Amino acid sequence: MKKHPLAILCLKASALILPFLLLVAYYIQRDPFMVIRHYADYDHSHICQNEGYVSWQKYKRYRDTERYDAFIMGNSCTMAFACADWNRHIHGRPFRLFCNNLGLADLLEQLQALDRQPRQPLRHLLVVLDRQSFVNYHPSTGAMHIMPPEVSHKRWLKVQTVFLQAFLDPKVLLPYLQYELTGQLRSSMRGIVNAHVPVRTTYTNDAILAQEDSIRKQGEAYWSGDSWKHARETRPSTSPRLLFAPHVRLLREIRTICRRNNTDLRLVIGPNTDRIAMNPHDVATLRAVLGHGRVYDYSNEDRLNDCHNFYDACHYRRPVGRQIMDAIYRQPTRPSPSQHQGAGLTKK
């Protein structure tokens, strides 16, 4: 019996749609990015997460019991700044609220969301950025950077669609399924699967740094690869100007929130293995808007730019963060540090 063409078309369409529907159902059931439901533990997931999303969920979960009043904010370089080290200077109740590749607009969104929370003091704010933080002045939109609806004011369905689309990307889906099926970590899964868990502490959201264990075991060999050779041979240079009128508007809004809450704000521009100094005009702009003595530029600090102070090309080690905090909180907030150097770090 000859089949009707419409029936054949429906069968073919079903054959195409069914795998997609199964993947969507699997995604909803597994919730790999931990954004569909709320969880008691976000820190032991082997799947790399949106740190801004997770940080906010953890803040909301523990804010009433922990009574946070101080926040380390910024990009992934905040891993070098432990709340316990910071608390030696501020004597507060700190929490690390950060996001990978965070830009000025993302920082403002997070700060505005904090400011909207009932009875939320903002006594201290330590903002950790690098020059890439100033490249863009629009909120980030990718799955690893988009803020939760409560922060971004984006519709819940819009945000969830971003995560679903990221999951269905073969660059994410195939390594994820391979790990789910085998439980084995491979180099192709880097950036998708965490090699070590937990990745954060529970109540302060500090980074748990497996890299320090690797450094203790490997010693000098840790910095022996070709990528580190580039870091050793790079000559110092200066970044082109990055801050313009849209950035200044964002900075003024940040300043307004800090003034309204009597917040002790410190902004740190960290060192980098590329040895690219922040443009002096941009540093001067930051200080003019946020206040002299509140912006600390370590991008041109030669000693800190040494490769032994880094876990990888982008992230400097916790002893560096500790030393920066010791320096900036030893300084009064009125005087301005020199335009090209950080505050109070002496060469050994």
Image (cartoon, rainbow, N blue to C red):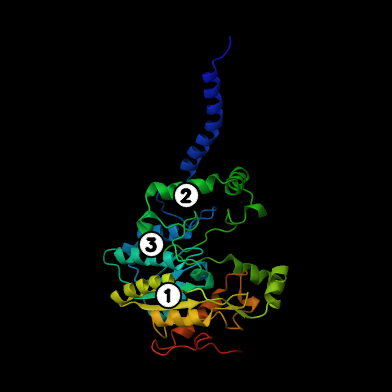
Kindly give the residue lying farthest to the front in the view shown. 245
Q: Quadrant of residue 299?
A: bottom right
Q: Which mark is residue 213?
A: none
Disc 1 to disc 3: CB gap under 8 Å: no
Q: Quadrant of residue 217?
A: bottom right
Q: Is the residue 323 above or below the residue 17 in the image?
A: below
Q: What residue is drawn where x is 39% and y is 57%?
A: 57
Which of marks 3 and 1 precedes in the sequence?
3
Please say whether residue 24 is visible from this viewpoint: yes
Which structural element holds mark 3?
A: helix
The residue that label 2 is drawn on is 162
Percent x, y for residue 73?
43, 69
Question: How many marks overall?
Answer: 3
Within 10 Å of disc 2 (Cα), the crowding (few <14, some 14-19, many 20+) is some
Which structural element holds mark 1?
A: strand
Say left or right for 115 vs 139: left
In the depicted view, which residue is nearer to us: 283 or 173? Answer: 283
Mark-to-mark CA distance, 3 and 2: 22 Å
Mark-to-mark CA distance, 1 and 3: 16 Å
Which of marks 2 and 1 precedes in the sequence?
1
The residue that label 3 is drawn on is 59
Nearer to us of marks 3 and 2 is 2
Which of marks 2 and 3 precedes in the sequence?
3
Nearer to us of marks 1 and 3 is 1
The quarter of the rendered structure image containing the C terminus is bottom right
Within 10 Å of disc 3 (Cα), the crowding (few <14, some 14-19, many 20+) is many
Say left or right for 299 vs 124: right
Percent x, y for residue 68?
35, 68
Q: What residue is drawn where x is 57% and y is 73%?
A: 316
The amino acid type, in three-letter code, at marker 1 is: Leu
